[in-house]
Structures are given as C-alpha cells and as structure tokens.
Amino acid sequence: MPLLRDALLSWSTTWTSSAAPFSQTVGPRPRYEIPVNCGPENDSVALESRAPAASPAPAPTAITSTAITSCGTPPGAPTTSDPVLAMLREALLAGSHRPGDRIREAPLASELGVSRRVVRAGLHALAEEGLLDLQPGGGTVVPDVTAKDVLDLYALRAGLGALLVRRVAMLGGEQLAPLSAALAEVRAAARGNDHVRIREVDLWFQDTLARTADLPQAARTFERLTARLRMLVHVLDMDYSQACDAIAREDTVVFDALRDADGNEAARLWRVKIERCVRFMVAQLPDDDVAPHLWTTLAGRPRLRPEASRGAAR
C-alpha cells in the first residue's frame, strides 16, 4: 500500500493534460503450494530457496470448529480472501493454550500443509487483529488475561455496540433476516444447554448485528474485538453451562427492540448485556474483588426503564 500511495502522489503532482492515465501493475500473490520444510531446527525460508522442485503440497486440512455456523463463517473472523489465515485463526482457537504460551510455527505449518514462512506471516496478521501478542523478537504468544484487558475490551464493545444497534434500529425490519437466523442458533443452543456452542453463536449473533448496521469501518473494528474476546474466553476456558438461558433472553430482547425500531431501548439492553458479560468474565480472574467496582466507576450503570425507575423511587 505505501508503494501504491507514493506512486499515486507522484503521478498526481506531475500530471498534465497530455499525461497518460495512471496504471499500476500488481505483483503475483504468494503461492501456498510450496513444499513444507518445518523441522524443529530448519530454516524454512532458506530450505525453500535451495530445495528441488517438488509436487504441490496437499490442500490445507480443514479445521473442525464449533464456531462454524449455518452461514459457514465463525464469529470474530474479519472478511479475508486468504484461506490459510482463516484456518490458522480457527486452529489456534481449537487448540489447548494457556496465557503466555508461545505459538510454535512448525506444528501449525505441518497441520495446514504450508511453509513456516506462511504461518509466521499469518501469526503476525492475527497479532494485528488482537488475537495474539507480538513479541519483540517477532514471535507470537497467547495473551495474558487481566482485569484491565477485560474492562478495556468491553468498554469498547459497549460504546461501539450501542452505535451499531442504534443504526440497525433505523434500517427497518426487512434488514433483520440474518440477525433472526443468528438468534435462532442462539435459542437452539440454549434449548440444548450446549454451553460450548452458545458462547460461539452468541458472538456470531453480535457480529451479525454489526454487519447488519452497514457501517463497514465500525463493523470491522467490532469483529476484531470479537476475535480478541474469543481468545480470552478460550484461554480462560469459561463455563457457560449456567448462562445459556440468560444469553438467549438477552439476545431476544435486543432483537425485539430492533424489530420495533426502538434504538434507545436496544442500546440500553445492549448495555445491560455488556454489564453481565463483564461481571461474568472478571469473576474468573483472581482480582475479581476490584474489577467490577472499577467497571461501574468507569462506565456507570445501565439506565433503568422509566417505569422501573419510578418503582425504585417508591
């Protein structure tokens, strides 16, 4: 992108009426069918440069994940044309990792049928998404989870989500079909008390809401937050067995408010949902005696309905 930007600036500053139209030739995209050389002590880049021609590697192995919905896309997966990046993301979330674990490139390269160089580039891209932490030497590690991380992430989701739900409420009920389908998956998981799947389809419901808003930049940012949240939930190995019904109720009332085109109520209900999520997550951390109070101080409490406020006053 910097090269393209510089070329455009150079052309525009020297343009005359007789100048030729601007053109830019894009180089070929990297190929992933390169031989896999991923021994524990091998430099895959050097080996590839001197390796004899070889038959193409087998197609990357599909990663099985409970995150895949009937729409075929997991939550927290920003749109990408790179299939290796998508499978690498799901492979990480399907693995068993603890905070601070270094991500080893060789096993992932072998599993996906690509080179370590490709895996390394993909891991750096996932670090930019917030899924991993990038180390000074170029390695990637599973992020630690602190109360500050949780509050930081959910503060962003609270504000950005409120903007998105207000926007969706403006669009009309005919735009809610994808969101209705996502809600059906949440309800199905709740009925089966499937506490593993419900945490994924709930995030899918939230991502679908973001995409429905037709605010591309806000939606992409929200999806990146979802990717980070999925990793935090995965690392904490959170138990949602007692939260299935609550999640289904929360998503249902948000959807109902959107269907009624009540943006204020939808935003309020979204804030209530975020409040429960924050308290649920920080309860898994050792400093949960401080974090909920800090959250309330920073974000305040969800606004009550007018009738509830009158009842409290009495």
Image: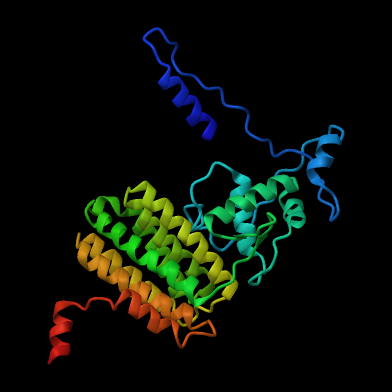
Q: Residue furthest top?
A: 18
Q: Place residue 272 in its image quadrant.
A: bottom left
Q: Is residue 58 above or below residue 20?
A: below
**Residue located 51% across and 29% down the image:** 4
**Residue 113 or residue 145, whichever sits in front:** 145
Total numbered circles: 0
Location of the C terminus (image quadrant): bottom left
Q: Residue 292: x, y in percent?
A: 41, 82
In this rendering, the answer to whether 289 lies above or below 126 is below
The residue at 81%/50% (across/down) is 38
Q: Quadrant of residue 19?
A: top left
Q: In the displayed structure, would residue 71 be above or below residue 236?
A: above
The answer to whether residue 36 shows anywhere in this view is no
In the image, residue 97 lies at what x, y percent? 66, 69
x and y percent of residue 2 in the render?
52, 34
Q: Residue furthest bottom?
A: 314
Regarding residue 122, the answer to whether it shows in the image is: yes
Residue at image coords 24%, 54% = 173
Q: Nearer the viewer, residue 233 or 254?
A: 233
Q: Is residue 231 left or right of residue 54?
A: left
Q: Which of these two is toward me, 161 or 258?
A: 161
